Image (cartoon, rainbow, N blue to C red):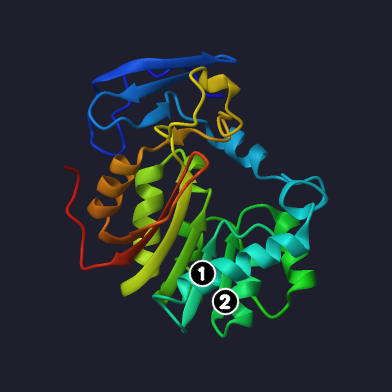
Amino acid sequence: MSASAPHPAPCQVCGSVDREPFVETDGMSLFRCRGCGVVFMDPMPDPATVEALYSNAYDGATAGYFAKTESKLRRSRGRVRQLGRYVRSGRFLDVGANGGFMAKAASDAGFEAWGVEPDPVSVAYAREHYPEINMFQGFIDQFLETPEGARPFDAVYCSEVLEHVPDADGFMAAIARAVKVGGLLYLTTPDIAHWRVPKNVLDWDGFSPPAHCIYFTPAALARFLSRHGFSIVRKGLAFKPGIKVFARRIEGGSGRS
């Protein structure tokens, strides 16, 4: 982890430095923004920590998301059907694609499917099992610098990734670049304000810094997306502590508010 920050980091959603301590765990400090309710680490994980988190994160593609691949594919096909209410064809990108399950489901539905994933083992699994999809090993900002990444996408899927990103503002700016105007973003992330989050947040299985370093509320996420040029068209039901939104890409962005 990096050394203690000399000055309080501003909230990446609203820019406020007015914050309160949220929790201390394993030498890491998290704070809640008094302006918008976002909870975040300060200091954020350094590059070495982030790299270690995404190096063979699933034990040679045998654990985690790879434990039940058929059920993973079934759920992915259901999510593609939901996406199909808004976008029926075109270019599809999964940011944080893991083993390529969502990209495979999108390909089967007729999309030109791409996946971006930093974990080399996950990318190797996708390339071996689903050669019909296109996988890029690395991060979204790196992919956007390639000829294929520079072409905007009709639909972008980003599930349970935003909470992992130390530079959430830069990450969402890259997502906005990836989605064509009029295109759709399908995004999910944990909900720190959900009524089922335990009073002692350390008892919540969705709380795992430094892997998860920023936590949104639904209102804060809506504000964040609006600033980056997205308008929410649908909010999914969440019986577990999570946020699921479908957001349309509109012209420009409003800047920090």
Q: Residue 113 carries which label?
A: 2
Q: Residue 251 in the image: state x and y as whole percent.
A: 21, 68
SS class, disc 1: strand
**Do the CB atoms of the residues marked 2 and 1 lie less than 8 Å apart?**
yes
Q: Which amino acid does label 1 sit on?
A: Leu
Quarter of the image with the C terminus is top left
Mark 2 to mark 1: distance in Å?
6 Å
Q: Residue at x 52, y 32 (%)?
A: 46
Q: Residue 54 in the image: state x and y as whole percent.
A: 65, 45
Q: Which sits in the foreground, 50 or 96?
A: 96
Q: Which sits in the foreground, 86 or 54?
A: 86
Q: Which sits in the foreground, 142 or 99?
A: 99
Q: Residue 26 in the image: state x and y as whole percent.
A: 60, 15
Residue denoted by label 1: 93
- Side of 125 relative to 233 (left or right): right
Q: Residue at x 72, y 57 (%)?
A: 122
Q: Which residue is drawn at 81% across and 45% down?
A: 59
Mark closer to the chain start, 2 or 1: 1
